[in-house]
Structure formats: structure tokens, C-alpha cells
Amino acid sequence: MNEDRNPNRLAAEWAVLGKHPGRSMGYEVLDGSLPGTRAQRYLWSATTGTPDAREPAGGLPWRVFLSGADGEPGSVCAVVDTSWDGSKDGTGRPSYTWRLLLLEWRAASRAGVTWTALDRAVAQAGSEPARPDASPAAVRTTAAELADTVDRLGFEWAAGTAALLLEGEQLVITAPPGRALPGLDERVRMLDAVCSLLPYGCRAWLSGATWTGRTEHDLRLVFAASARSGQQEVPLGTGRPPAPRSGTAGRYLTELLRLRAKRGSTAVVVAHLLAATTALPLRDAAEAVRLLQELDLLDSVLNDIRHGHGQVGDVQRLLELHSVESLDEGQLETVVVFLADCARRPGAEEAQALLTRHWTPRAPDLLAAHVVARAPSKQTLTLAKEYLTLLLGLEGTHPGSFDRLFTALATAPGYDPAWAGCLVRMVEKEFGYDCEAADRVLLDSREAGLAWLDVLFGARPRDLRPLSRLVALAAGTPVDRRPGWLRFAGLLTGEFSAAEVVATDAAEFASGHGDAWRIALETARDNNRPAVIGPMWTVLRQLVRSGTHAQVSAVLDSVAPPGAAEVSPQTAADADLLRMSAPFGGAGGRLAPTMRRLRLLGADDPGLDAYTATVVRRTEAEPELKEQVIEALLGDEPDPDGSSWTVLSLWMRQRPSIEPTVRAGLARRLTSAAPARWIGLDLPEDLVDGLVYRDGLAWLRPVRRLRAADADRVPLEELGRIVAEACPHRTFSPQLLDEVALLVRRRGSRFAFDLTTELDVRAHGLGLALYQALGSSREYQDVRDGLVRHSRGQENRHRMLLAALGAAGTVASTRPGAVPTTPRAVPYTTPRAVPPAGPAVPPPEPPDRTGAGHPAPLPTAADYPPDDRDRRRGFLPWSRKRRNS
């Protein structure tokens, strides 16, 4: 029915309960159109107590509104009027009358009959019993009238009371403190007004009374003096009753208040609810919320979705009333995201079908916007994956939606590029899908590319084909537009040349993953690209210094094997330096295991210039490394082919500042227990000048000169001069004595005799001092033994010569032609000169006894072959080579 009064009348059932005059028996159905048993059920359900004169507010008549009765299956719309006309029964007690007017639910709900209308209908019948043909007018109270009562009560109070009814509470309205309840008609309007804030269909289970006494009842909304146990009291004039306990009833109250505030009219809200005449089951608050939201379907459904209470059915009704084209951007996003969230859950075919049926091309963009509206995290990556999975399933009906969503997610402006990189890699891995638009994000954003690289390298098993794809894509862009990490990746795969790559590119690549350096070297090894070591120098150097030297060295040897033709001198230098710069303890001793590539170049290799230039460049800013390299190049002993000293020589010419370090290293070695190996180095004179002035190295220059003179086969006089000048105080340094001993071992004892003779000529007694020095040390025992044999031979020969000359004290044979016999040997005496400090030397043995007439032959150099271990032929084979630079 509409708001106007309808002149049509409704067929009503009726019944009267009371006592016949003068009878004292119980109450019975006196008349009516209903069967007596059925009438009694409704009439007894309306019995709420006995009037009490002590309660003025409880005075008759009472009105009770029923929606059913115990034993009755269906809902009705009924009113029971309790009145007293002053009559009494046979015992003298008041005889009350109950009059029932009942409408079947279907007819009443179709007409929209309200409790106020029923009250008016029963009031028109007066005190006489209604006749069987009685038919009340089908008139419902207007929404404006009910809304006016609601506003007088206070909308918040009435709405809160209605929400409690929706929760299934038994409510008792009591008088405000110090005030009386209004009259009967106003109470009826109040009851009807509160119920008008619920969908009309709730009247299928609602009930109320203008007053109840002390009798137990199941009525929902009543006036009474106070609430009993199990009932909720809602005093009038208190602003708002207690809040509902259930979440759904609370939502209903929130929506009711929101709609009233939004519409600005209680009548609009009441009119909408009166129109919802479909019967609602008891406590179906969710349906009541839905019906209430029909008033503001679009806003209410969207608001419900935003608060996490959305229902697919509500959205379906919304889309049936509002096409997706009529929704603005925000409304459309809310609906699409809600349906997508429902559709991505298991068993949500209804939501997926609804999304498909009401598809909008904007859906991928809206879903992407919803994802990137949140902070980047693993959760948003998971959400993006689920949306992509959903749209992949819709490709059959909406082709291209997956690609559009992926592109929108990957290219979202202003969003975390690292998240985008992870997304691209996730889609590659999970869906086997890539697109150029997403790849461009990796090329244009360093953060996105490195995040993508991190995920790529962290996968097991590792697949580097996507990296090759990006390198191929980057090849079509200018060099300055390529990200550094990708330029380096192109060097690894052979796509880009080393000239296009700098050290920062390698560092950027390595920053993409903790294991990126190893992956880079292994990839370079597989692609035969040892040149990558140069750009990676800084990265690898840091790794070596941090303690991962063993791992780095192992991979380095596979990338740049020593002696490989494709390993340039620059790369060889980098690899050698990285191996050499390990934090080993001590100095030296590292040449053989750590600089093998240098030793394979050779002293005359033209690549040594490039090798040296790399060493100079790498050590320029690292004093500690510079000292390590110098120590390694010097080593424990000079390398046989001289390549290490060649690098040092070139280095000193380019950077004279390292000479003090080299000089200090040489000084330590020259003052060691075995300096002879270092004497033959082709040292610059200024370097030698700096060495000879150090403590304990004054011997260096004469020893070097003596060795050089020996190598040049200078006359004996020159050798004597060098030795004599080195011994102004007739004292031989151990190093000079070693060098002389080497000469004697090499040239023989006669050479020693001649040399000492020359020394005596230059400085009286110097030759004898040399003999004394050689004879006083066990180190030269072999030299001493040879000199003793030579001297004894000379002694015997001289005696024979004296005998032959007939000198006194000689004995000769008297037989003709006989050879003179050997005279008696003269005992050998030790020279009186005090020998140098050292271990005691035993006295020389007496001269050898020789056969009669056969003097001992003079010893020669062949009698004393040099020991192979100590043989020195002048300078080392490379000692006299000098490089021009």
C-alpha cells in the first residue's frame, strides 16, 4: 500500500474471552469467528497480569500486539484489547474482557498494517463484541506519523531499542525518573515507532504491550513498572539504551544512524523499512542489515565491503541495479577488488562468475592500484600473485587481462622498484611469463634490477637464461642507457666488450646478491671471459681481505689459468695480486704459489710492461698492499728467469718512491744467513749506494765488483786490487770471504796462492791474513784442505830444488844419474799472526810422504772440482740483463 489511506477493508478474525454475567467459573471464549481452541491460544498469550489499582500506569484498557502464539504455526498480525466495564462475576470480583482482532500475515503484510492501525480498528468496535462480518479498514499508519513519534522519542534512543529487539532481547520500557508514562494511544504509537525502525518483515516475530503486570510472558517490547529477570530495561528519556552485544545488531544500529544522518529525514528511513514486508526469521539480523542498506544500496554495500562485512549477494543486487559503467573510479575499485578477493578463495565460483559477467576493462588496473596502495612487502607480492592467477583463469573470456595486470603492477609509478624487480622474477618463475614493458623497468631502475637479480641468483636450481634475455634487450639501447650491473652481465656473457664496463658496474652487479661474485666468475669461466677479473678487482679485493681468499683463489684459477693464451698481462697481474694479497703470516715465501702467471711471462716478455702498469695502478692507493707486493716480488730467493726483478725495476722507474721499500727488503735479505743469492741482482747503482751505507752492508759493493770482475775474467792484478781495497785493515768480512772462497773453489788452490801473493804485494801480510781467515773457519774446510795440499806440494818441490842446487842441509844420491832423494821434511809451523775470532782450527797435518826420487806433483784446479750445490758462475744468468724503458 502507499502512504494514502486505502478505503479497502480487510477480512479479520475475531474472538471475545470473558465470563457470562453472574458466573464465577473461569474465563471462556464467549464469541468469535475463530475456533475456540485457536482463539484461546492467542487470548491466553496476551494475558500479561491482573490490573492493580496501586499502579496508576497499569490502568485498563491494555493493548497487546501479537505475531503468533504457542501451538500456532504461522505468523499473524493481531491485537488483544483487555478492558473492564465494571461488571463482576458471581464471587464479586471484576470480570474482565479480552477482545481479539486477527489478520493473517499475508494480507496484513501486503496492506502494511501497523500496530497503530490495529489499535484504531479495535477501538472503533467499542465495548460491544465485534460481529462476524466485522472488517477493519486496511489502513496503515503513515511513515511521517511514525517518524514524528520516533523523533519525539529521540532517534538514537528509538534506534538503539530497535537494535536490541533485533538481537532477540525482551525489552521493558519504563517511565523516566520522576515522570509518568504517557497515555494508552501514545504508548501504542511509541511501540509502533520503535518497530518502524526495523524492516516491516520483523513484525512476523515482534510482539508488544502497553502494560504488563507480574505474569510471565514472551512479549518482546512492553511497558511495565520495572524489568524482571531476563529482561532488558530501557527507560524513556535516557538518550540511548545499552549497546547491542552482537556484532550484527551493532552493524544495524551503525547503519541506521548513518542513513539517518546522510538522508537527514527519519520519514525516509521509516518509509523504506515499512516497504520491506517480506517476513524475516527471528534474529536474522544480517538480513535486516541488508534490507536496511537497500535504502542506500550503493553506499551501504560499498561501506560494508570497506568494513569487511561485504556479501557477494549484496554486490550482485547492486550490480543488477547499477551497471559497472555507472560507478565512479573509487566505487568500481571497491566492487572489483571485493569480487576478486572472494573469487581467489577456494570454492568462490559465484564471485568469479559475477566478476566475469560484470567485467570491466578497468579491472586489471584497479586490482593493480589496490595492491600498490599498500606498503611493499611479501604479503603484497603474494596478493599480486593471487590476482594474476585469477586473471590467468579469465584469459579465455577476457584475453589480455593477465598481461595488463602484470604490466600495471610492474610499472606502477612511484612504487618501490625493488618490489617490482621481485615481482618480475616471481612472474617469470611461477608463470613462465615475461613482457618487454616489465623488462624495461629492470633496465630503467637500478633498484628494480638488483632486486630481480637477487631473486634470480637465490633460486635453486639457478637459471641464468633470463639474464641473457635482459642483456640481449639492453644491447639495443645506447651504452649510457644501460644499467651498470647489466653492462657487466653483458661482459660475462660476451655480449659487451670490456671497454664498455667499469669497476662500478661490477660492484653494482656484486651488490645484487651475496653470491653474485662467484656466479660472475663461474659465468666468465664458462664463457671464457677472464677479462672480467679487472672490473671485479675492487669486489674481489674486499672479499680477499674479509677472509674468503681460499674461495676466491679457487675460482680465479679456473677463470684465468696460469699460462693460458687468452689471459692478458693485465688480467694475469690482477689474478696474481689477488692470490698474493691473502692475509698470510710473514713476509716473502709467496712468489711461487701466488705469482705463477708472472713467472710464466719471462723476463723479456713484452707483456711485462702491461703487467707492471697494472701492479702500479692497483697498489697506488694501498700502501699495505704495495709492501706486500714488493715482498712477494722479492720472495725468498730471486726467480730464475728474473721476471720478478724486471717488474720491480720497471716499477721503481715509474714510481721512485718505492725504492726505500725495495731497498729495505733487499737489506733484510742481504743481511740474512744466505745473502749470496741476492748479490748478483742487476741493481741500479743508486740503489746499491743506498744499501752500502746501511749497517752491515759495507761489503756489498766490493763483493759485487769481485763477482763482476770474475765473470769478466779480468787479470789477477785487478782481482787483487778489489780485495785489497775492501780490506784496509787486513780484515775480511764474512761475505767477502765467502766470495773469495767461491773463487778458490772454482779456480783452484794455485789461484789462491797467486791471489795471496798479489795481496801481499799490495798490502804486506794481507795474503797471509786471507790464509788465516780461510783456515780459521770450519765452513771453508774443503778450501783449507786444498790449500794445505798445495802448500805441502810446494814445500816438497822447493826442498827438491834446494837439493838439486846443492844447498846446505840437502842429501843427494852418489850414483851416477841418480835422482836426488827427497830431503827430510821440515815440520810445518803455524804463522804467528793471531787468527780472527772463531772456532778453534786444528794444526795442519805434516806434509805428505812421497816416494823416493818422486816428488809430489803440483795440485791443479782439476784436483778440486767445485760442489754443484755451491757453484756460482759470475752473476745469475739474468743478472746482467738490463731493460730499456
Image (cartoon, rainbow, N blue to C red):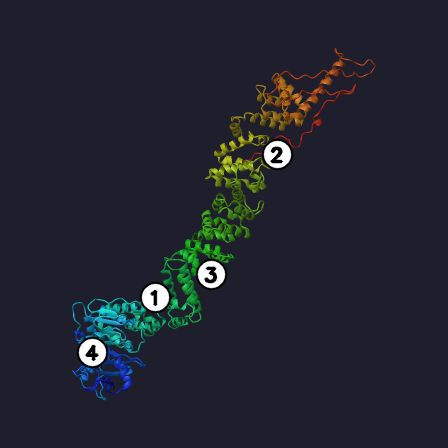
Q: Which mark is first along the chain, 4 or 2?
A: 4
Element marked by disc 4: strand
Q: CA distance from mark 1 to mark 4?
A: 45 Å
Mark sitting on residue 62:
4
Quadrant assignment for the N terminus: bottom left
Amino acid carrying mark 1 in the image: Gly
Do residues under tags 3 and 2 come within 8 Å of each other at their CB atoms?
A: no
> To which residue does mark 2 refer?
877
- Name the quadrant containing residue 817: top right
Q: Is residue 415 left or right of residue 873?
A: left
- Name the quadrant containing residue 177: bottom left
Do residues under tags 1 and 4 come within 8 Å of each other at their CB atoms?
A: no
Label 2 packing within 10 angstroms: few (<14), some (14-19), many (20+): few
Quick check: can you spot residue 885?
Answer: no
Mark sitting on residue 308:
1
Q: Which mark is first along the chain, 3 or 4?
A: 4
